[in-house]
Amino acid sequence: MTLDFSVVTDAWQSLLFGTLGTLFLAFSGMLIAMFIGIAGVVILRMQMWLPSLLVTAFVEIVRNTPFLVQIFFVFFALPLAGIRLNPTMTAVIALGVNGGAYAIEIIRGGVESIPKGQTEAGLALGLHKHEVFRLIVLTPALRAIYPSLSSQFILLTLTTAICTSISAYELTSVGQRIEAETFRSFEVYFTLTGIYLVISLVTMWCLAAIGRWAFSYPQR
Amino acid sequence: MASMIEMQRIEKYYGAFHALKNINLTVAKGEKIVLCGPSGSGKSTLIRCINHLETIKSGEIVVAGHRLNDSQKAVDAVRREVGMVFQQFNLFPHKTVLENCILAPMRVRKLSRSEAEATARKYLERVRIGDQAEKYPAQLSGGQQQRVAIARALCMEPKAMLFDEPTSALDPEMVKEVLDTMVSLARDGMTMICVTHEMGFARQVADRVIFMADGQIIEENDPESFFRAPKHERTRAFLGEILAHH
């Protein structure tokens, strides 16, 4: 068997745009996940039974069902609710919602790790509960769980490949198209593997840089 | 003399545990009280009730004319008048010394940043730590952190200060710098309630020393009489314990 990587090099532009598509899905998903994660923890902290129950149910449902099923569900459920989005936007929402459920669990752990004295000091100074959370607890809590959150976000980045199932525009779907046209399966997936590896490493590096910037204060 | 803090018939429970039993305490404006007693006697709980970090089952608390109840409005009013210093400092690690000091004045007292910074620098100077304003808490020693915590509380210009074992978490060589700061605050007429076992401090500044055990006030007196002639057996036993090594 001879290997012919020219089919891959000839398609470099498609692969580049596919990579950008993957990065777009990953970073949009992370932003939504981050938002859902913090919002979920805020709701849990209100300690009202119905909102807490809904958040807990959301977290458990998402964490105990396959992402492939979730993305099909969003893809076919949203139109029923009258919302028509293209596959890429659907993928962003599915990734964000899925990542958000995991983020809620992770961020909640971080918030619980912050000593009670921090909250008490804020309250004693006359700050209200929501101010104490936003201004005093949140940053140290995020710092505490930032490594876990980063690995979760790397996982989210790799999960974007599943979005090919609803024909979202990303690297794996581009690869599948090249393979279908050229039948050079090994060359195509070998290349995809390499590109995903680079995407992961670069994402990891970016997240670490963001972490260093956001949490630059010295730790005791 | 007008009273700054009034506590009447306070009862407090943690579940079935009766933490405070019929506490009656009036603190006059400018008065300095030292609260002492064995651990678990309720002294921290008592001062934490004053700024509503703990809720009471029954009784009445009036602080600087504000009657405390569970409404946010009453709690806000009281907390604006009362500063608190904790055993573990509780500085905010992600904020510089200066940011620690201006946060509440800006958000609660609605000062502008420049006003808040001016106030903060004044009080940081006062606790002799003005040159550390741009540092983070983790870069300071325990004694320095506790002095920042005192300055942070003073930045709200409180009418009374509560100290919850402010020197208990400090290395011995740093206790003095914090006590000196508290003494100078006392000299300036601040109303203070200090939970502490620093009996030298009690002798030096307290108008009254109160001894608590099992959630009750057992004995109170001026420091001279309190140390020289404790009336209650439990007070004598306690003083025997803590003064044995002095």
Image: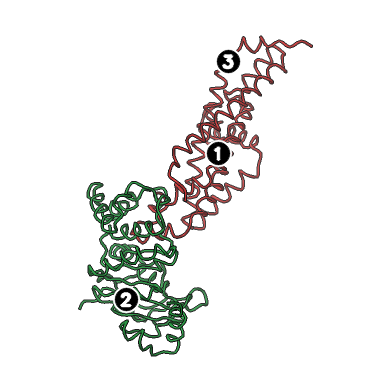
Chain colours: A red, B green
* Marks 1/3 same chain: yes
Q: Quadrant of residue B5?
A: bottom left
Is there a contact, CB below 8 Å, between mark 1 and mark 3?
A: no
Q: Secondary structure at mark 1?
A: helix
Name the amino acid type tagged 2.
Answer: Ile
Task: Tell me the CA gap for discs 1 and 2.
Answer: 51 Å
- Determine the chain carrying the residue at label 3: A
Q: Quadrant of residue B193?
A: bottom left
Q: Which mark is residue A150?
A: 1
* Residue located at (38% from left, 79% from top): B10
Q: Is residue A205 above or below residue B111?
A: above
* Residue located at (23% from left, 70% from top): B189
Name the amino acid type tagged 1.
Answer: Ser
- Determine the chain carrying the residue at label 1: A
Judge depth for marks 1 and 2 and give the one in front: 2
Task: Tell me the CA gap for discs 2 and 3.
Answer: 77 Å
Is there a contact, CB below 8 Å, between mark 2 and mark 3?
A: no
Q: Residues within 10 Å of mark 3 (few under 14, many from 20)?
A: some
Q: Which residue is mark 2?
A: B33
Name the amino acid type tagged 3.
Answer: Ser
